[in-house]
Image (cartoon, rainbow, N blue to C red):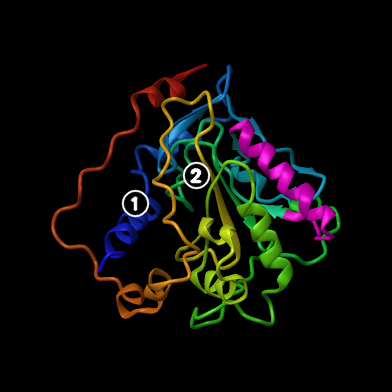
Amino acid sequence: MVIRLPCFLLLAAFVAGPTQAQAPSWSSVAGPTAGPARSIGSASLGCISGAVALPTEGPGWQAVRLSRNRNWGHPVLIAAIRSLAGRARQAGLPDLWIGDLGQPRGGPLPYGHASHQFGLDVDIWLDLSPKPLTPVRARENIPEQSLVLPDQSAADPHLFTAAHARLIRMAAELPGIDRIFVNHGIKRSLCAAHAGEPWLRYVRPWRGHDSHMHIRLRCPSGSPDCHDQAPPPPGDGCDASLDWWLSPEARHPVPRSGPPAPRPRMPAACAGILSAH
């Protein structure tokens, strides 16, 4: 079927994690390189120089799990988070929990993601409960709540509200947006209420993502070695490609047989980013 190959390739991008030899070196670097910001490579095979940190909190947001040291990104990503949080606050929404961005120099993460490597990804939790300013330490173990029905046919109507849809739309309308990943049940509920609206093109279904949305921006200017994914297909995505996620093929994928594919190599420029003082 037509969608099988793109879904397989996207699965590889999310699931094919780093080798044990790669990940600790990138995750052990405490700070970014100096100089102008440059995203290098791709979301699942890349790095960043000149990254900046998202502050622990600001107008409309509070960063969580800061002990991971994954609150770093390209300045355009930091600006997008600030903008989204500000718009959400103006719309009367509570503070946003901001999850992982990336490591100080990007690169493979030791756990949790195969992407988030080039400074242009961020996870924003879909928890719209009221939030007083919470001490940083208390933000380490906040539980996430799924907003999707157990059979993943749709978002849970008792938990997923028009405010969630409004927040996702705000994110999809950010300048420079590449795509937003949500659980396919959430996408299906968005289609039921907003089919045909242009912003839905950027909201893409993917496994997991039932408690947060994963925002990815396009490569910014000044990053000639940065590589975007192909743009999302035209249309709102409320079509057979969405129905596929409820098929036996999607629910029970057949393990790949044969020898493992050769692991792609990091961009050459990333070696210098990792070793820079």
How far across and how far down the image is residue 26, in percent? 46, 34
Q: Residue at x 19, y 52 (%)?
A: 260
Magenta stretch holds residue 142: no
Q: Which mark is residue 216?
A: none
Q: Which kind of residue does numbered mark 1 sit on?
A: Ala
Left or right: residue 62 versus residue 270 is right
Under circle 1, the secondary element is loop
How many residues crowd mark 2 within 10 Å: few (<14), some (14–19), many (20+)?
many
How far across and how far down the image is residue 64, in percent? 69, 51
Residue that mark 1 sits on: 16
On the image, which quarter does residue 149 sit in?
bottom right
How far across and how far down the image is residue 43, in percent? 44, 42
Q: Which kind of residue does numbered mark 2 sit on?
A: His
Q: Residue at x 59, y 44 (%)?
A: 68
Classify the position of the N terminus by image quarter: bottom left
Residue that mark 2 sits on: 116
Prevailing secondary structure class for the magenta stretch in the rendered image: helix
Q: Residue at x 36, y 55 (%)?
A: 10
Residue 25 visible here: no
Magenta stretch holds residue 83: yes
Up the image or down, 249 lies above or below 237; here it is below
Under circle 2, the secondary element is loop
Dot 2 or dot 1, earlier in sequence: 1
Q: Which residues are magenta?
A: 74-96
Up the image or down, 54 lies above or below 146; here it is above
Q: Residue at x 46, y 32 (%)?
A: 47
On the image, which quarter does residue 157 sit in?
bottom right
Left or right: residue 246 versus residue 164 is left
Up the image or down, 27 lies above or below 240; here it is above
What is the CA distance from the residue labelled 2 to the residue labelled 1? 13 Å
How far across and how far down the image is residue 171, in percent? 64, 53
